[in-house]
C-alpha cells in the first residue's frame, strides 16, 4: 500500500512539472522580440524638439533679414539720435538712402529700423502707400513725438539732404521763435558728432522745419532749454499750400558751416550722428498732420 501511494505521488509530481517546463520553452522564442523592442525607447526631449527646428529656420523672415539693425528692446530713447544705427545704403554711389520705405510694416510703433521717441502725449503714426512709394503719416493732438534713426554719413562726401513732404494741418499759431508757441507740423533733424559730455547738450543739430508764423528762410537757435547747439531753418510756412507735396534739397554741409560756426568746430567732424522726423503741438494745445518720404543724402 505504501508502495502504491509512493508511485501515485511521484506520478503526480511529474505531471505537475511537465506543463511548467513547456510554458517556459514556449516563451523563450519571444525573448528576441523583447530585446528588439528595447532599443526603440521613447525619444529624449532633445530628439523630440529637433524636428521643429527646420520649420523655425525655414519660416518667412524677410522682415528680420532685410531690415537695418535695430536697437535692443532695452534701449531707451536719448536726446541724441544715435540708436538704432542704420547702415548707409548707397545707390549708384551717388545716393545714401535714409527713408525709402518699401512696406507698411511697423515695429514697436515705428518703421522697421527706426525708434519711436515720445516726448508727450500719444502718437498717431503709420506708414501708408501712395501711387509709387510708401510715406510716413503723423498726426499730433497736443502731443510731441517722432522717430529717429542713427544713420552715419559723411556729409563732406554727401553734402545734400533731399526729401519730400506734405502738411495737411498746421498747429494754431505755431512759431519757432517763441518757446511757448514752438510747435511745427513736421521737423527734420540731422545730428552730428557730439563735441562734449553730456551728449544731449553738446550735439550740433540742424533742424529743417515747416513752421506757421516764422518767415521762410528764417534761421536761428532753438528757444528751448538745452537748444544752444541746435539751429533751425524754416523751409516752409503757412504761405505754402496745404495738402500738396513739396520736394526739398539742402546743402547741409554749407548750412553747418554757416549756422554752427560758433560751435567748438567750424565744420562737421566725422559722420552724422542720426536723422529724426518729429511733429509737436503740445505748446499751442492744438493739432497738426504731416507726411514725409523719399529722404536721402546725395553727392549733388
Image: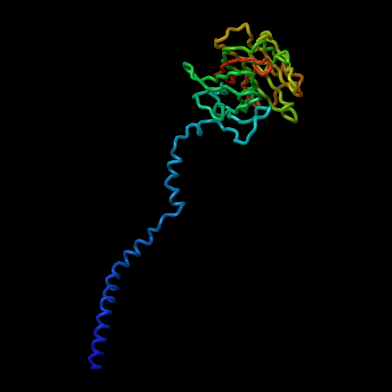
Residue 102 relative to residue 86: left or right: left
123 is higher (above) or lower (below) than 246: below
Q: How many marks?
A: 0
The residue under the point 31% across, 64% down is 33
The residue under the point 30% across, 67% down is 30
Instruction: Give 147 or 257, whichever is nearer the viewer.
Output: 147
Quadrant of residue 268 within the rendered picture: top right
Q: Position of residue 241 (x, y in %)?
A: 58, 7
Quadrant of residue 213 within the rendered picture: top right
Quadrant of residue 249 within the rendered picture: top right
Q: Check the image and tell me how it is coloured.
A: rainbow
Q: Position of residue 95 (x, y in %)?
A: 56, 21
Outermost residue, front side: 1
Instruction: Give 297 or 156, whichever is nearer the viewer.
Output: 297
The residue under the point 28% across, 73% down is 23
Quadrant of the image containing the N terminus: bottom left
> Does the image show residue 163?
yes
Instruction: Give 160 or 291, whichever is nearer the viewer.
Output: 291
Residue 84 relative to residue 92: left or right: right
> Does the image show residue 156?
no
Quadrant of the image containing the C terminus: top right
Q: Position of residue 18 (x, y in %)?
A: 26, 78
Q: Position of residue 149 (x, y in %)?
A: 61, 27
26 is higher (above) or lower (below) than 96: below
Amino acid at each position: 500500500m505504501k508502495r502504491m501511494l509512493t508511485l501515485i505521488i511521484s506520478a503526480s509530481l511529474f505531471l505537475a512539472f511537465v506543463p511548467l517546463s513547456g510554458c517556459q520553452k514556449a516563451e523563450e522564442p519571444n525573448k528576441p522580440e523583447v530585446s528588439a523592442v528595447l532599443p526603440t525607447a521613447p525619444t529624449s526631449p532633445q530628439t523630440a524638439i529637433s524636428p521643429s527646428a527646420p520649420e523655425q529656420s525655414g519660416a518667412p523672415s524677410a522682415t528680420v533679414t532685410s531690415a537695418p539693425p535695430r536697437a535692443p528692446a532695452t534701449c531707451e530713447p536719448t536726446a541724441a539720435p544715435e540708436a538704432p544705427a542704420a547702415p548707409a545704403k548707397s545707390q549708384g554711389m551717388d545716393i545714401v538712402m535714409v527713408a525709402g520705405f518699401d512696406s507698411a510694416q511697423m515695429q514697436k510703433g515705428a518703421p522697421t529700423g527706426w525708434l519711436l521717441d515720445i516726448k508727450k502725449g500719444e502718437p498717431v503714426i503709420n506708414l501708408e502707400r501712395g501711387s509709387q512709394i510708401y510715406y510716413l503719416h503723423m498726426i499730433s493732438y497736443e502731443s510731441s513725438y517722432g522717430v529717429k534713426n542713427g544713420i552715419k554719413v559723411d556729409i563732406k562726401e554727401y553734402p545734400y539732404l533731399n526729401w519730400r513732404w506734405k502738411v495737411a494741418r498746421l498747429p494754431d499759431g505755431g512759431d519757432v521763435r517763441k518757446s511757448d508757441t514752438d510747435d511745427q507740423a513736421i521737423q527734420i533733424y540731422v545730428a552730428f558728432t557730439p563735441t562734449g559730455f553730456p551728449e544731449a547738450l553738446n550735439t550740433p543739430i540742424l533742424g529743417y522745419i515747416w513752421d506757421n508764423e516764422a518767415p521762410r528762410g528764417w534761421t536761428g537757435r532753438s528757444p528751448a532749454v538745452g537748444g544752444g547747439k541746435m539751429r533751425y531753418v524754416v523751409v516752409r510756412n503757412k504761405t505754402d499750400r496745404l495738402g500738396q507735396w513739396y520736394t526739398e534739397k539742402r546743402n547741409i554741409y554749407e548750412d553747418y558751416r554757416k549756422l554752427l560756426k560758433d560751435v567748438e568746430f567750424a565744420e562737421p567732424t566725422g559722420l552724422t550722428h542720426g536723422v529724426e522726423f518729429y511733429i509737436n503741438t503740445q505748446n499751442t494745445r492744438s493739432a497738426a498732420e504731416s507726411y514725409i518720404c523719399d529722404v536721402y543724402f546725395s553727392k549733388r
